[in-house]
Amino acid sequence: MQVGILGGGQLGRMLALAGYPLGVRCVVYDPSPDACAGEVAPLLCAPYDAADSLERFALGKQVITYEFENVPVETARQLERYAPVRPTPRALELFQDRLLEKQFLQEVGIPTPAFAPVDLDNPAGALEQVGCPCVVKARRGGYDGKGQAVAQTHGDYFRAVAQRGSQPLIAEAFVPFERELSVVGVRGSNGETRVYPLVQNHHHEGILRLSVAPAPNSDALLPTAYDYIQRLTHALGYVGVIALEMFQVGEQLLANEVAPRVHNSGHWTIEGAHTSQFENHLRAILNLPLGSTAARGVSAMVNLIGEVPDIGAILRIEGAHLHLYGKSPRRGRKLGHITLCADDHASLRKRLALLISRASLPVPLDDTRC
Ligand code: AMP
């Protein structure tokens, strides 16, 4: 079985690695010759609009998938001539634009923070709708908090809009959330849908640093998260893994962002769940039965950003699993992650404290984390 993956970053790399035991051979397509998935799978290096390279890439593939949502929609649509593209290119189109994404969430009945498109000729209109404080975000291309600014005052808002020039923007009400949660789900081609336990996420400078799974005290919220994943995937005839980032406010879950792909907050599933998100994505898009999404014990996933700490010190910690992506260090770059596994939250907390101090990670630990 051969799968083509658009995008050759760490997600493509982990998908390719998950394919080996299943006898699935992945080939990745990326415009960069340094794409890190190229270390573990054949890499076809060409621009996303090179028709002849895309055709060569698609030949002999059972299915084509993508590992990040900023692949041009046209590329995915073009590939549909040769092989099924899963998830559907429509998901790319919707979720690479924050306005279309929020409108779609609203259409399928999933609550979101109040939002409005910013009309650059009349920016006051959006401010009237969402109020202050608010968050100004680029509609496209923003990830890991890039391209966005929190506006506490009307002055901040107009400055943030002016600083972003002519790029299309969206304004959102600022949500004073209790915590950030995400749910990773998977839908098979027969419509069967499963979700992993909810994950609690901690960001620093807009980048995910720590995920704890299952999120403490989250069992009562799981049916709502499952309902959201069903609404999203059913409406799109979606096949594959999907992730939804949410804010918890009281008992309510507000949707922030959808990723039509495997997700950073699902990396813990490699060691921490019965079937990893990567394997389940491949199973789904290849019409194979889905695997169990149940957790084995509890896990914490810590991203390694910008530099790799002393590997020996990390591996001496009981239950620690290291994943390096083969990328050269650069400020703000995700170079790898560590998953810590334990039987219960109390021992996970101890291991996490050890990891954070040994590896000098910028993840402040407090009692609410796990
Ligand atoms: P995003 O790029 O939309 O995932 O945003 C990155 C981070 O900014 C989120 O994980 C939140 O911590 C924060 N954030 C984004 N939108 C809002 C919002 N409407 N209210 C409060 N915080 C937000």
Image: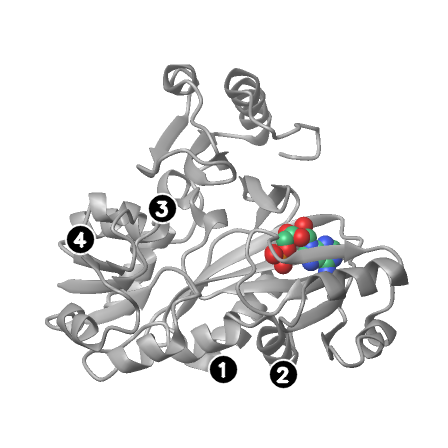
Q: CA distance from mark 1 to mark 4?
A: 30 Å
Residue drawn at x 86%, y 55% is 152
The answer to which of marks 2 and 4 sits earlier in the sequence is 4
Residue at the limit of the structure toward the left, as seen here = 60
Residue drawn at x 32%, y 72% is 86
Q: CA distance from mark 2 to mark 4?
A: 38 Å
Asked which secondary structure carries label 1, the reply is helix
The amino acid at mark 4 is: Leu
The answer to which of marks 3 and 2 sits earlier in the sequence is 2
| Residue under numbered circle 1 | 235
Please indicate whether residue 101 sits to the left or right of residue 291 in the image: right
**Quarter that holds the C terminus:** top right
Q: Which mark is residue 22?
A: 4
| Above or below 206: residue 330 | above
Query: Does residue 370 appear in the picture of this structure?
Result: yes
The answer to which of marks 1 and 2 sits earlier in the sequence is 2
Q: Which mark is residue 107?
A: 2
Please report contact status of discs 1 and 2: CB closer than 8 Å, yes or no.
yes
The amino acid at mark 2 is: Glu
Depth order, front residue of 185/96:
96
Asked which secondary structure carries label 3, the reply is loop
User: Are there few (<14), some (14-19), or many (20+) residues within 10 Å of tag 1?
Assistant: few
